[in-house]
Image (cartoon, grey):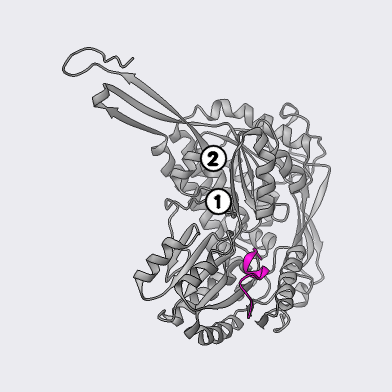
Amino acid sequence: MTQFLNRVSWDRKLDVKTPDQMKEPRAEEKFILRDRQSSGGTMDVLVVVDNFIAGTMLPCRRLLDSIEPGTGAVWAKVPDSGKLEVDAAVVAAKRAFAKWSKLTGHERATCLLKAADLLESRLEDFAEAESRDQGKPVHLARTYDVPRAIFNLRHAAHALPHLLTTSTVQAEAGVVSYVLREPAGVVGIICPWTVPLCGFVNRLAPAIMCGNTVVAKPSLLTSVTAFMFCKILQDAGFPAGVVNVVFGSGPSAGELLASHPDLPLLTFGGTTIMSKRIVQTAAPLLKKVSVKAGGNNAAVVFSDCDLERCVATLRRNSFINQGETRLCTSRIFVEESLHDEFLSTFVDAVRELRVGPPSDEGFFMGAIVSKTQLEKIREYINSALEERGTVLCGEGIDVCYVPDANKNGFFMRPTVISGLQADSRCLKEEIAGPVVCVVPFSTEAEAVSLVNKTCLSQGASIWTSNLVVAHRLAHRLKVRKVWTNCWSSSELDAPSEMETDSGKAALAARDDLEFFTLPKTVTTMVLHEEEGEELDFY
């Protein structure tokens, strides 16, 4: 990773005003990577992130600390971008739009496929950086996050060109119509910290493949892999200004993107509270907005399920990525006759999960993304205790042992809580951490009511051997995705759009096309086959 970052970072003093003042880095400009001796005796790397505007890495005089979750130490300096940087990025994107939008789908796809190949060749560098930046285990970044980003690039390049034009022959009317899907302009992308690289590329790839240009803002907590990806874009031959990335805080750079008059489209990933704020900010400008928020997902476990498989899968999908993804299960509703047996088996299985340094291959869970998030999760656990819930394992019960080098990191044992009532905060609100609440139900109707009590669910899994019950339940649950006897098994072309308090977002290729383009219908009158003359309907 150090060698890769050496190729993308420069220590320069340059004020950003307009893209006209931007220049390529000189050979004599020195690298910014500074070796520092850690307390453990190993050499770490301090990464100084630059903004990426008009195809150039540009430093910012105002820098913010980015903390490595596994150690609690500063490992990166991130620009504190403001109006100057955001305006410069928008200007660069508007200038690039004129040419980029006129390229054929094949020409744009060539750039995306090249970026995918380059990312694949540097997979290990990105996996290491993603792990250090977000706190997730490096093996998870290596086997899921980076490969998924590569897949997203290739999927957009292959799928979208075939959908950009459709045609219809209306023989009875004597006309031929076709619909052009035209790019909308400059797209603003505000990325979450849950899956930083994958979340960034998932929105970026379809946006630019449809002919738009982009100004993106990664999360302040997880900026490094987006910064590294800017070098990928350069090497892949993307024209200057097609993709611009400004780094900084949500209240500063994020708000500026949401309120910018020259961004007709905005896509956001984050908390429900921030999603509502983003929509309110963008509404007066009539922006087209897509938000992905929430993640208080449920599992419904019936007594006739395959208990061994159910427990193994729910343990994984509840605590993978420290429970910090919007598809993680945080509410498990179990049929009364199975409740006690399930709870005992599940708690024993959860206790076996190992928590430790993200760089260590032997741990299932790494560190929570930030100290603030760790404190928020603990607040929810304390709230559960005040509501007479019982913590069966995890926080406050089981000791979390980590090496001395990681003693200041943000670690938490996976936690299971029982005994909560349906109106508990932990059941209604998104925790975004390794906490699962288990609640019994007596009837199918009660299970549906419990799942639907919050509108923050992205998905739900149903565990039963009776597929009639599974399908009936699937139709009644107010979620975007339903899995039966499995979890997170779907394709990118499977639509998942649904409007709830967890946001309205499009994830399938056709949904991306709808969001990132504007339709234009062209109708041409043709000669009638029998009469040999044009038809007049007016």
Q: Quadrant of the N terminus?
A: bottom right
Left or right: 328, with 44 as reference point: left
Q: Is residue 218 visible?
A: no
Provide residue 436's location: percent of width, then percent of height: 61, 74
CA–CA distance between discs 2 and 1? 18 Å
Left or right: 533, with 205 as reference point: left
Name which of mark 2 and mark 1 comes first in the sequence. 1
Vertically, is 101 above or below 130? above
Provide residue 176's location: percent of width, then percent of height: 31, 24
Identify the residue at horizontal 61%, vertical 33% (top origin).
264
Q: Report the span colored magenta.
A: 419-431
Q: Is residue 387 visible?
A: yes
Residue 127 lies in the magenta stretch: no
- Label 2: state its secondary structure: helix
Residue hosting label 2: 207
User: Viewer-proximal residue, 163 or 416?
Assistant: 416
- Label 1: state its secondary structure: helix
Provide residue 162's location: percent of width, then percent of height: 38, 38
Q: Quadrant of the C terminus?
A: top left
Q: Residue 477 — which label?
A: none
Q: Can you tell which quarter of the image residue 131 is in?
A: bottom right
| Type of the residue with mark 2 | Ala
Q: Can you tell which quarter of the image residue 168 is in?
A: top left
Determine crowd level at label 2: few under 14, some 14-19, many 20+ residues with C-alpha closer than 10 A: many
Q: Farthest residue toward the left?
A: 530
Residue hosting label 1: 119
